[in-house]
Image (cartoon, helix red, strand yellow):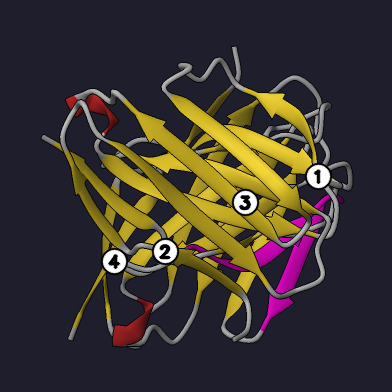
């Protein structure tokens, strides 16, 4: 079967750095997405990786290793507004998104 | 209005009721999706429409019936639901459903409670 694993919850301190990991096993691979979802709001797109390596976008970076079935989202200079759930999703060979259950990130002052 | 809108935002219905959820996208996209989001579970894809044609139906019970009259509007008709159908129902759209890099844009969701 298809499976996306990510930690259920993480806690970090304002101003620090946090890395949220995602491992996947899917039938085919057409890219990996990270979304942010604040409580009670819609998920919003953060990043897309289809080739191995690191993609940097401001305070957020996303890394992909296709051979290891692994990705991480790196958040730097954490702010209180970064408290949210972070969803990892992989597009399989049928161009269908397979979603993880999300990682709830709690930022403490 | 911009983006993806959904109405109503909250809905409480009995198991014998019939109701409809509405989604509208103002992004000029060709693909629209219905998802179910339950607490601490992955997003569950329910239906996909591409250019108004249904391309995916992920074994969704027949008490959920989608309708896509045009590329901008998507409905989810509900009847004789069960309490376990209580969840957040999210609508999304993207440029196309067959492209790898096309991110999906989500609406705010309808919080459905079945009593």
Classify the position of the C terminus of chain A by image quarter: bottom left
Q: Residue at x 80, y 33 (%)?
A: A29
Q: Which mark is residue B74?
A: 3
Q: Given contact means CB atoms under 8 Å apart, are the residues at marks 3 and 1 in contact?
A: no
Q: Residues within 10 Å of mark 3 (few under 14, many from 20)?
A: many
Q: Residues within 10 Å of mark 2 (few under 14, many from 20)?
A: some
Q: Residue at x 77, y 55 (%)?
A: A49
In this image, B84 relative to B4: left or right?
Answer: left
Task: Indicate the position of residue B97 as horizontal and vertical percent values.
Answer: 81, 44
Task: Indicate the position of residue B23 as horizontal and vertical percent values.
Answer: 55, 59
Residue bearing mark 1: B52
Residue A6 visible: no
Residue bearing mark 2: B7
Closer to the camera, B58 or B61?
B61
Magenta stretch bounds:
A43-57
Q: Residue at x 51, y 65 (%)?
A: B107
In this rendering, the label closer to the viewer, 2 or 4? 2
């Amino acid at each position: 079967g298809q499976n996306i694993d990510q930690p259920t919850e993480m806690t970090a301190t304002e101003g620090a750095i946090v890395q949220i990991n995602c491992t996947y096993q899917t039938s085919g691979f057409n890219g990996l997405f990270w979304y942010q979802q604040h409580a009670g709001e819609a998920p919003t797109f953060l990043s897309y990786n289809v080739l191995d390596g690191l993609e940097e976008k401001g305070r957020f970076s996303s890394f992909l290793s296709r051979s290891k079935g692994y990705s991480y989202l790196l958040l730097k200079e954490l702010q209180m507004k970064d408290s949210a759930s972070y969803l990892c999703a992989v597009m399989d060979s049928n161009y269908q998104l397979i979603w993880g259950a999300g990682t709830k990130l709690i930022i403490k002052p | 209005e911009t983006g993806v809108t959904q109405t109503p935002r909250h809905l409480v219905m009995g198991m014998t009721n019939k109701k409809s959820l509405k989604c509208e996208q103002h992004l000029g996209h060709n693909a629209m999706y219905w998802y179910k989001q339950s607490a601490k579970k992955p997003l569950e894809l329910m239906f996909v429409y591409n250019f108004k044609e249904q391309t995916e139906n992920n074994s969704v019970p027949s008490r959920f019936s989608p309708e896509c009259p045009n590329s901008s509007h998507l409905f989810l008709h509900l009847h004789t639901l069960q309490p376990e159908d209580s969840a957040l129902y999210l609508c999304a759209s993207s440029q196309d459903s067959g492209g790898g890099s096309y991110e999906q844009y989500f609406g705010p969701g309808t919080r459905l409670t079945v009593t």
